[in-house]
Amino acid sequence: MESYKREFIDFLKSANVLKFGDFTAKSGRKIPYFINAGEIKTGEQIAKLGEFYAKAYFEKVGNKPSVLYGPAYKGISIAVSAAVALSKNGLNVPFFFNRKEAKDHGEGGVFVGYVPQAGEEVVIVEDVITAGTAIRESMSILSGLENVKVIATFVMVDRKEKGKTEKSAMAEVEDEFGFPVYSVVDVYDIIEYLEEDAANAENVERIKNYLAVNGAKL
């Protein structure tokens, strides 16, 4: 396993972002592990997370500027931290996020922060994709922006789960909307990491059993 992947999984565990047990995903699936960016609660932690997203951005998008969009609520802090990390590495990009309900006073509207202009490109930053539900919600919200193009989505973990078909949810999002979805690590990286310690055998077995039913076949 690449060293940065191990470092990232160590970070997720130490911040309690990666948990094992019985959980229900936004898609309604019962899952044996959970990725919760809401557990990141300190300046040091969110700064570190932003650095990982910035690293992934430079690797996949390069120095090309875009506008970062963080879906409410967990995507908000990710967008802010990623924008800060990018700026420290010479790429100053604007960011914005949405409100759950449109505001009818003050500046009004559903968006907070920079509002992309026609012709500008947007990168969505999320915590995780399970069935693609959250990304489709984001695309519905962003459709209100005139002539703005989403060029990529970045998430912490690719769960490698099937969506509406036998394809992975991430692959379905790519097919449906025409942009790539990138992740820092995937569930098989997590399994490899866990298998290095025999004490994790039960969690490994539960994740593998889950993937046998819900894992993408294509």
Image (spheres, rainbow, N blue to C red):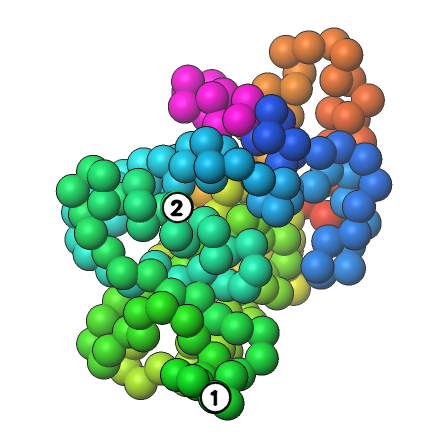
Q: Is residue 108 magenta?
A: no
Measured along the vertical axis of the image, is residue 70 above or below residue 22? below
Q: Residue 13: where, in percent of width, then height?
A: 62, 27
Dominant secondary structure of the magenta stretch?
helix
Measured along the vertical axis of the image, is residue 204 above or below residue 153? above
Q: Residue 152: where, in percent of width, then height?
A: 36, 58
Taking the image as drawn, is residue 101 in sight? Answer: yes
Q: Which residues are magenta?
A: 1-11
Q: Residue 148: where, in percent of width, then height?
A: 29, 76
- 64 or 29, which is in the foreground? 64
Judge left or right: residue 41 versus residue 202. Answer: left
Badge 2 crowding class, 10 Å Cα cut-off, few under 14, some 14 to 19, many 20 or more, is: many
Return the residue at label 1. 105
Taking the image as drawn, is residue 178 in sight? Answer: no
- 212 or 207, which is in the foreground? 207
Return the residue at label 2. 81
Which marked residue is nearer to the observer: mark 2 or mark 1?
1
Disc 1 marks a residue whose amino acid type is His
Distance from label 2 to label 1 (Cα)?
A: 28 Å
Q: Are marks 2 and 1 in contact (CB under 8 Å)?
A: no
Q: Is residue 5 magenta?
A: yes
